[in-house]
Image (cartoon, helix red, strand yellow):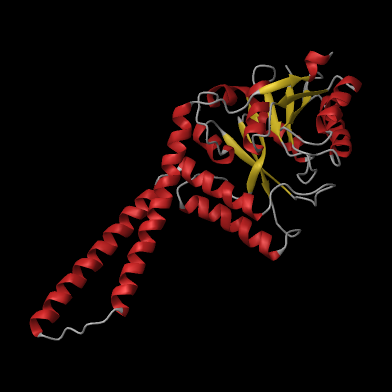
Amino acid sequence: MKPVLYIVIPCYNEEKVLPITCELFLEKITTLVKKNKIDNSSRILFVNDGSKDHTWDIICELAEKDEHYMGISQSRNRGHQNAVLAGLMEAKDKCDITISIDCDGQDDINAMDEMVDQYLDGSEIVYGVRSKRDTDTFFKRFTAEGFYKLMNLMGAEVVFNHADYRLVSSRVLKEFANFEEVNIFLRGMFPLVGFKSTSVYYERHERIAGESHYPLSKMLALAFDGITSLSIKPIRMITGLGGFIAILSFIGVVWSVVMAILGKTVTGWASMVCIISFIGGVQLICLGVLGEYIGKIYMEVKHRPRYIISERTEEKK
């Protein structure tokens, strides 16, 4: 029996690129059906993440034009990760496999063929991994690769050069639904689920149209969210730093007492100011990291919904 595939595509202000890439996604679905790899009941599921332009109107028009298109709209913008999650949870009971991919056309959709093949060979999760970053600037390449290295260093298990282009079976998604945390970092959470997984390598292209929604500031925020959501290593580092400074302080106290006994003390404010400033700065950094974790605990205990779907194209038919 051929599997039913849902391609999950988060969209935020994509009115410029959506009319172009939607045809590419439909062509890919059609091609896979003709190759007898997937069932014709497979669908393209757009997730409108509270767009302020005409993205939702375009999605509704596409759904009316072809049955392979469908869409859901969130009540407000909740971020890329929550948009992907909303689409996956919407699809998990309707299909056998999902492939999440961005709308901008940068990820090579032809990699979907190999992803489906790997699923048919027994893999439950197939990660789309960039084979190279030749199209990136030096700064972009340096910061992006540093992002993955930092994540692994901090204890967050992520696949190097993998973003959110992946195939996931409905079996995995049903287990993933038990992960109820509000602060989500999908590329670090799916490896926690387990099951057989593999990777498919592809070349990433330039964005077809529109502007990127992931500047450096958002990348840094995503990295920090990922670290604090998946690892307590920063807190352990603070403990280690505190112990190291305590040892230095104890040595300093012993040295001061010895110098006082020998009568070699010299009064001065420079050393005192340096020590106080150093200790104060370290304390503020440590409090900031602890505050981030406490803030996340605060958000988790509220159990607020991670997404709210306000409209579905199916309801308009």
Q: x and y percent of residue 69 in the render?
A: 83, 24
Q: x and y percent of residue 129 in the render?
A: 66, 46
Q: State which quadrant residue 68 falls in.
A: top right
**Residue 64 to residue 151: above or below:** above
Name the residue: 43% across, 43% down: 293
Q: x and y percent of residue 88 in the render?
A: 65, 27
**Residue 33 to residue 82: above or below:** above
Q: Is residue 296 left or right of residue 59?
A: left
Q: Is residue 171 left or right of residue 298?
A: right
* Front position in the image: 290 or 228: 290
Q: Is residue 145 left or right of residue 205?
A: left
Name the residue: 58% across, 36% down: 197
Residue 220 visible in image: yes
Residue most toward the left?
A: 261
Q: Quadrant of the C terminus?
A: top right
* Front position in the image: 138 or 251: 251
Figure label count: 0
Q: Is residue 300 left or right of residue 118?
A: left
Name the residue: 63% across, 53% down: 217
**Residue 167 to residue 154: above or below:** above
Residue 121 visible in image: no
Q: Quadrant of the N terminus?
A: top right
Q: State which quadrant residue 90 falls in.
A: top right
Q: x and y percent of residue 12 in the render?
A: 75, 37
